Amino acid sequence: MAILKADKLGVNVAKAPSMLTGAIPKKAWCDTPAIFKPGNYAYPAKKEIHEYHQKNLPQAIGGVPRDWDPEKDDWLLPDGWEQIILQGLKERLDKFRSLKIFMDCCVRCGACADKCHFFLGTGDPKNMPVLRAELMRSVYRNDFTLGGKILRKLAGGRPMTFGVLKEWFMYYYQCTECRRCSVYCPYGIDTAEVTMMGRELLHLVGVNINWILEPAANSNRTGNHMGLQPHTLKENVEYLCDDIEEVTGIRINPTFNRKGAEILFITPSADVFAEPGIYTAMGYLLLFEHIGLDYTWSTYASEGGNFGLFTNNELMKKLNAKMYAEAKRLGVKWILGGECGHMWRVLHQYMDTMNGPADFLEVPTSPITGTRFDNAASTKMVHISEFTADLIKNGKLNLDKSRNDHRKVTWHDSCNTARGMGLLDEPRYVLNSVVNDFHEMPENTIREQTFCCGSGTGLNTDEIMELRMRGGLPRANAVKHVRDKYDVNTLACVCAIDRATLTSLMNYWNPDVQVAGLSELVGNALVMEGEKERETGLRFEELAGKEEGEG
Amino acid sequence: MQLDELLIENKGEILNGWVDQVLASYPEDAARIFKKGTDRFANPIGSAVKKSLWEIYVLLFEKDEPEQIISPLEQLVQLRAVQTFSPSEAVGMAYVLKYVVKDECRKEKVDDQEGWFSFDQKVDTLAYTLFDMFMQCRERLYQVRLAEFKSGNNIATDGGCPSKAMDGNNAEKAELKTLNS
């Protein structure tokens, strides 16, 4: 092993063989191949799931349904797959002006380079947003620009090869479309949309992952990602009502698929099935009971999440339309949405031009406070945090903050609600109204600059746990800071994927920090009429001052 | 010159070299950014490497408190345990320190048998500690994976209606009824 001279060590960090790895870091990014190994890729879609989607949306889901292995050299791609990709890219360049601009206008200033959580956690240059986009931009340059057609590699062009396809599959699935990089881009390039297009093109040749396609298939078939059938969804909510009764002494009997209800409530299915989302759902149930809301659950539009966003815009449109079809069928006035991330991204950024305006619904008006939500005048859908903040502002909730005194809380701005729709202050207002001990994480890790959980866009599958832990490092690092400084023990948020993935992230990086939905904390604080004295919180945890032996 | 004096007098050079070598385990473009950035939230890897190595160096060679090194190593090892390193690459930084110090000693004549003995012992302690902590992190990682599996997250890709997995659910009851009738 070569021993470096000390004076050289301080000058350049990586010009000689690494003492740790022996590797000589000389290769340019485009000459470094993507190598798939267990743990760095999510499993491809099952053959029958691929078939199911292809039957429903043949124009979006191409390729041959098959069992294939990313680690092998033959991905069993369709004949002429290169042309399929190039044709798909051409169609998208014509259809989406934003994509054409994003392909053309990057000046490689580098402002985004160190802003991506995947880059910060992996150190892989292809996770710099500029390089991740360059993976597609180089192909665009090669085949769609005059300079590229003539000068090829000299103009930064690359032909579409199997090696490039492998890079796309690796790095467009190491981007959670969180858009943090876009905040820093002086041209406003939305790298998330480049990733979205990259994934769409991969789907055209049958390169996909199961953790996205199977939940999307479930959602298309039964109405939700979990594949919960109507009776199961109803039964699960009733189980949650049993738990609420045990904690509060109050029996709640929510309605399902009730025609004529004023409001349709839609939330991610994880809220009624998976921990810790179920505690958030208990919070919703308590809140609606507290104010006597005329609302109904739907067992068909039983999913807020929309994995179409991670697949193809046509699937996204279809899954979004289902919520509105159900609202129409039930004859409700407007839709109230629960704590979800990408449901709100789809709603805020794409719904209006895909399925909107929803003219058959009314502009949402809170039946309790009379507040008209003009921000939702077209989509007719209001976020639970806006709705709750308005109730609190108008003094309609009886709250006992001290019931959350066992929690020292910090706030995670979920990318989709914070950057995607500007929901920054409403949840903080609610949080400050229901907890006594709230500490912000550092400024460059919250609000518009928030760091992603590292597992969004359908990457929250366990076979890539290490990758997720790397991607989530910047978020976990900021949580660690407030844990060490203020003894924070709870990370609150308004996103179902966050609730699931931040739980794993905390279990690895900061094991003594729990993850809670905002509505869970609201539910803990709500003083219900006729309730019994609460000994525990909604997850049956001991309250401060109620510890065993202190009676 | 005694080795312990050299370790204190040349602390800056040694630590710079050590930090550079550990950062050099990342690709060149990344290493450059990690080395430069000073904000611990904007540059978590670079900050963790610098902070951990400085703190453990002080504990080992200035304060002589090798038993205290676990806490400052924690985040660094957590990091290395989930990155794409082989185990030896992930925790080999103790041995890198040996090379860096020996290289520094070429300039000065250090004939200090006792000092070298003590130095080796401390660096070996660091290596053993790193290895133990690395294994704890890997075990924790698998526990996290298991906990997530048990939380119901996997249901989205299990296929079929998850009511099958529930206690006392309608599907199960229906099945029991059929069996009993």
Image (tube, rainbow, N blue to C red):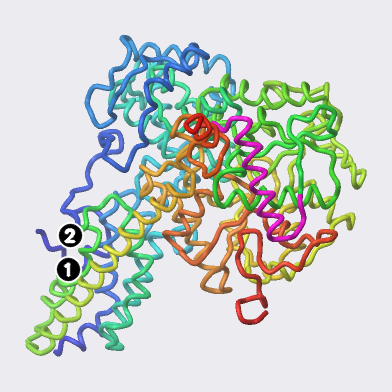
Residue A236 x/y as whole percent: 62, 42
Quarter occupied by residue A463: top left
Whether labels 1 and 2 belong to a single chain: the reply is no
Marks 1 and 2 sit apart, C-alpha to C-alpha, by 9 Å
Three-letter amino acid code of the residue under disc 1: Tyr
Give, as a single range, the part of the protein colored magenta: A227-251
Three-letter amino acid code of the residue under disc 2: Met
Residue A214 x/y as whole percent: 47, 28
Is the C terminus of chain A in the top left, top right, bottom left or bottom right quadrant?
Answer: bottom right
Local SS, label 2: loop
User: In the rendered image, which residue does mark 1 sit on?
Assistant: B95
Please give the name of the residue rendered at 47% of the width and 44% of the height, measured from the top-left corner. Answer: A455
Is the N terminus of chain A in the top left, top right, bottom left or bottom right quadrant?
Answer: bottom left
Res A194 seen here: no
Query: Where B120 sits versus A363, above or below?
Result: below
**Residue situated in front as seen by the camera: B71 or A228:** A228
Q: Are marks 1 and 2 in contact (CB under 8 Å)?
A: yes
